[in-house]
Image (spheres, grey):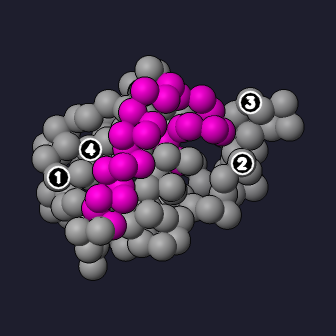
Amino acid sequence: MITSLKQMELYKYLESIRQEPYVLGKHDCLTFTNKAWEILYDRGWATDVLGKYLTKSGKLKTVKTLQKELNIVTYCDLVDARLDRHEYMPDFGMLVGVEPDDTAVFNVALGICVGTTVAVVGNEGLIYVPVQDAKICWVN
C-alpha cells in the first residue's frame, strides 16, 4: 500500500527532476521509473538492469545484444518478467507504458501513474500524459 508519505516523497522527486532532460543511461525511462518505484515500494523494479543496456562508450546496445544478454525484445518483456500486468485503468504508483516519443528505445515509453496523468521522461524534462493514453500497466 502506498502511504501519503510515499506519495509526497514521489512528488518531491518529480519536482526535483521536472526539467532534467532525457539522457540515455542517466535519466531515461528505466532509470526514472526504477527510482520512482524505489521511492514508492522501497525497492527498484529493475535495479539489476541499470547500465546493462549500454555499451562501454555509453551508447545503447543493439536489440540483438539485448535479446541475448537480457532475454528481452521490448520493455514489456522486461517488466512482465518482474511485475504483474494490470488490465484496467492505471492507479497511482503503477508502472505504465504509453505511446513512445522520439526518445523511446522500444515500443513503449515507461512512466509512473500519478493520478490522472502519467509522468514520463521527455527531451526537455518530465512530461505528463493523460492516464487514458496508457497502453499497458503493471502492479507491484
Q: Which residue is mark 1?
A: 115
Q: Which amino acid does the dot numbered 1 rest on?
A: Gly
Q: Is residue 25 left or right of residue 30?
A: right
Q: How many angstroms separate mark 2 from mark 3 (CA)?
A: 10 Å
Q: Which residue is mark 2?
A: 51
Tell me which corner region of the image, top left, top right, bottom left or bottom right, holds residue 139.
Answer: bottom left
Determine whether 134 is above or below 100 in the image. Answer: below
Q: How many angstroms separate mark 1 from mark 3 (CA)?
A: 33 Å
Q: Is residue 33 left or right of residue 116?
A: right
Label 3 near label 4: C-beta < 8 Å? no
- The quarter in which the C terminus is drawn is bottom left
- Determine whether the residue tagged by mark 4 lies in a helix, strand or loop: strand
| Residue 72 is covered by the magenta coloring | no
Label 1 near label 2: C-beta < 8 Å? no
Name the residue at 74% across, 40% down. 54
Name the residue at 60% across, 29% down. 23
Of the image marks 4 and 3, the number of the one nearer the N terminus: 3
- Determine whether the residue tagged by mark 3 lies in a helix, strand or loop: loop
Q: How many angstroms separate mark 2 from mark 1 (CA)?
A: 29 Å
Q: Which residues are magenta?
A: 6-30
Q: Which residue is mark 3?
A: 59
Q: How many angstroms separate mark 1 from mark 4 (CA)?
A: 7 Å
Q: Which residue is mark 4?
A: 118
